[in-house]
Image: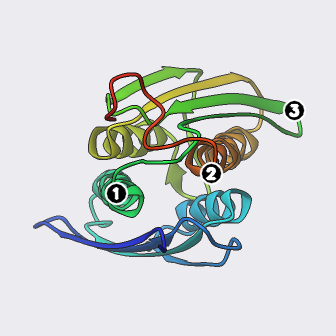
């Protein structure tokens, strides 16, 4: 059975379409109107080996906040739909990713409890992108996907590199968590549900 989902989210502020195949080869088509964010989502797809399409139109005349957050919400919903009952997956994933002088440790648990733990500073802008909204993307994703993410951006001096380390780590950690293991029957939980 293919693990994929197609999600559309429309509000007065944004119109988002996400198509996501978990068992892909890293092919992507990203268009959010925010070039730096497109670059980060492309990195996520490539390093996660996900086939991902994201098309977003938002109120960018105000700022990028609504668009970035709503893409996170739509991607979170797509993940839940693609995994269906979460059966047979490893559930946990982690990555330690260096990007030149920056280092990010990223861990996730697809256990059904929405939690975001964020450590590290992302302030300022790069490529016209307000880095403060990165956390909002992950909060939206966590709330909708009902997953636990621990993101530790340990250090870095270049803002572009710091954000890139986070998104590459996200791809690698999530790829591990959604990987099937034939030894796992049903969900990896003593409760029997996630």
Percent x, y of residue 36? 59, 62
Which sits in the foreground, 22 or 123? Answer: 22
Question: Which residue occupies 36% across, 52% down?
Answer: 76
Q: Secondary structure at mark 2?
A: loop
Q: Dot 3 surroundings within 10 Å: few (below 14), some, or many (20 or more)?
A: few
Q: Dot 2 surroundings within 10 Å: few (below 14), some, or many (20 or more)?
A: some
Q: Nearer the viewer, mark 2 or mark 3?
A: 2
Quadrant in the picture for the C terminus: top left
* 87 over 103 or under it: above or below: below
Tag of residue 179: 2
Percent x, y of residue 62? 27, 59
Q: CA distance from mark 1 to mark 3?
A: 38 Å
Q: Which residue is mark 3?
A: 101
> In the rendered structure, which disc, 2 or 1, sits on the residue that comes first in sequence?
1
Colouring of the image? rainbow
Q: Nearer the viewer, mark 1 or mark 3?
A: 1
Q: Secondary structure at mark 1?
A: loop
Tell whether label 3 touches label 2 (CB within 8 Å).
Answer: no
Residue 105 in the figure: left or right of residue 129: right
Q: CA distance from mark 2 to mark 1?
A: 14 Å
Percent x, y of residue 20? 47, 70
* 146 over 72 or under it: above or below: above
Residue 148 in the figure: left or right of residue 122: left
Q: Quadrant of residue 96?
A: top right
Percent x, y of residue 45? 63, 64
Q: Which residue is mark 1?
A: 84
Question: Which residue occupies 56% across, 41% down?
Answer: 184
Residue at the right extreme of this rendering: 100
Q: Secondary structure at mark 3?
A: loop
> In the rendered structure, which disc, 2 or 3, sits on the residue that comes first in sequence?
3
């Amino acid at each position: 059975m293919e693990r994929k989902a197609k999600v559309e989210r429309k509000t007065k502020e944004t119109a988002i379409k996400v198509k996501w195949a978990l068992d892909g080869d890293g092919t992507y088509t990203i268009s959010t109107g925010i070039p730096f964010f497109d670059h980060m989502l492309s990195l996520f797809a490539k390093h996660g080996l996900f086939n991902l399409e994201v098309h977003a139109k938002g109120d960018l005349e105000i700022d990028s906040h609504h668009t970035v957050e709503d893409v996170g919400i739509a991607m979170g919903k797509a993940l839940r739909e693609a995994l269906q009952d979460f059966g047979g997956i490893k559930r946990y994933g982690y990555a330690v990713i260096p990007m030149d002088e920056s280092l990010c440790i990223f861990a996730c648990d697809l256990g059904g409890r929405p939690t975001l733990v964020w450590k590290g500073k992302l302030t300022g802008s790069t490529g016209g992108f307000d880095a403060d909204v990165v956390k909002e993307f992950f909060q939206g994703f966590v709330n909708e996907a009902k997953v636990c993410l621990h993101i530790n951006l340990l250090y870095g001096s270049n803002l572009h590199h710091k954000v890139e380390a986070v998104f590459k780590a996200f791809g690698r950690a999530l790829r591990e968590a959604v990987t099937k293991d034939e030894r796992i029957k049903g969900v990896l939980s003593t409760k029997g549900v996630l």
